[in-house]
Amino acid sequence: MKDFIVKRLKDQLFVARAYYPSIVKLDGMENLSHEMKQNIQEHGHMLSEAISDADLPELHRVNMAKMDQTIAAAKSCDAECTNVEKKLTQLLDMTEDEALFHARQSAYLYRLGVQTLPKSLHCLSMRLTVDYFNASSDMEHSDAEKFGNPAFQHHVIFSTNLLASSMTINSSVINSEESANMVFHLMTDGQNFYAFKNWFIRNSYKGATIRVLNFEYLQMKNLGNGIVDQLSPSEEFRITSNSNALTLNTLTRTEYISMFGHSLFLLPELFTNLKRVIVLEDDTIVQRDLSLLWNLDLKGKVIGAVQFCQVKFHQLRAYLPDFPYNSSSCIWMSGVSIIDLDEWREHDVTGIHHRILEKLRHDTEASWRSAALPAGLLAFQNLIHPIEGQWVQFGLGHDYGLAHGAIKKAAILHYNGNMKPWLELGIHRYKKYWKRYLPRDDVFMMDCNVNP
């Protein structure tokens, strides 16, 4: 324990403060009360500057010994036990209030650190946007004929994170056997559109075609269905449950479930000429060629995805509206999925999704985002073809206990959880699998000090 002595000092301080008011009131105890007051001040000063034992001054053991003697002397005095007990209770209440405050503050700061875009990535986006408008000419794609050609492998990413999405694309093409056959449709919002566009104009990806799209512009120009007007990428939900409800010593287990955001339910309208797409999330890294996944026989189903049986429908019944469902069914994860758009259109999955949304309250942004969980689960009921779990290794954004062998064997790594690899909070031992695809010689990255 790195703070064993610090905790011992705090215990001494706690007891000394409980006895001090009673000792001060006793006749003939002026020296003891003065000594106790001095020791309390010295302990308070040490603890104000120390979090771990390494932070303590060299003389801390001398002060501990002096405090032990002072407390022993105080206990030998004829002090009223009720007064000491009352003071201990008062200090305990104050400590509990302080602990609760710090716990809430810590949780808030952690959440803020997770949700806030790092300064370096904000700098990168701003620099690229300014550079785009300062450029003398706008380079357009020479291979635009690939965009709607179903003969190519089409991959779709919805993202507002430039670095994360570029890493997903970079890892995909590096590990592809036919990267020139790959087309990436990168859907972002109006705020990030020009930074994304400039980045993918400046960088090449082994002959793969990268197409950047402004979702909000497409909605205004073509779709405009009034239900999904703003970009809504995949959402992540923190699910906590008991691992075994039948035992007294139940252990809570926390999982992070990724689910399609509302924007992804417009895939058939966004890509009218395509028959099949692979959807990747921006917190994934591809370690193998995805041709086998692209050619997977979905056996008449709409979507191929990894089932996640650690969480089942009955555990989420409080969040599911009044729609029929099989309570023993496993949920699915949206980190990577292969979608048959023809089957999607035939089963009218978009219409089902919209009807589910109409039954859910989503009058605020938070409720709108949280509606993605029930809508995503219910819209694809009986329409999912399970793909082998070995395809994807989940948990690199929250689980410290993943085996190195399992990570190396997986075709795709999914950093689901709060500790994303581009954040300082990211789990250090998993960052190397992500950072190996990081471009090192880009001038904007160097200027903005981008080094996750």
Image (spheres, helix red, strand yellow):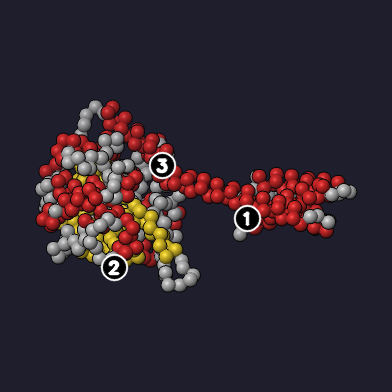
Q: Identify the residue at the far right of this view.
A: 28
- What whole-number distance in Å separates the C-alpha atoms at marks 3 and 2? 37 Å
Q: Amino acid at mark 1?
A: Asp
Q: Which residue is found at the position 19% from the left and 50% from the top?
A: 355
User: Which element carries disc 2, helix, strand or loop?
Assistant: loop
Q: Secondary structure at mark 1?
A: loop
Between circles 3 and 2, the one closer to the viewer is 2
Q: Which image quadrant for residue 292? A: bottom left
Dot 3 falls on a residue whose secondary structure is loop
> Does 150 appear above or below 122?
below
Of the image marks 1 and 2, the number of the one nearer the N terminus: 1
Q: Residues within 10 Å of mark 1 (few under 14, many from 20)?
A: some
Residue drawn 25% across the image and 57% down it: 322
Numbered mark located on residue 328 in the image: 2
Q: Circles 3 and 2: CB distance less than 8 Å?
A: no
Separation of residues labelled 3 and 1 (CA atoms) = 30 Å
The residue most toward the front is: 82
**Residue beneath the point at 23% across and 37% down:** 216
Query: How many neighbours does mark 3 have within 10 angstroms: few (below 14), some (14-19), or many (20 or more)?
Result: few
Q: Amino acid at mark 3?
A: Thr
Q: Is residue 379 visible?
A: yes
Residue 165 is situated, as x and y percent measured from the top left of the image, at 30, 46
Residue marked by disc 1: 3
Distance, label 1 to label 2, CA atoms, is 46 Å
Indicate the position of residue 410 as horizontal and vertical percent values: 32, 63
Q: Quadrant of residue 404?
A: bottom left
The circle drawn on residue 291 is none
Identify which amino acid the numbered label 2 is placed on: Ser
Q: Which residue is mark 3?
A: 116
Q: On the image, which quarter does residue 229 sit in?
A: top left
Task: Where is residue 151? Give x, y as percent.
Answer: 11, 53
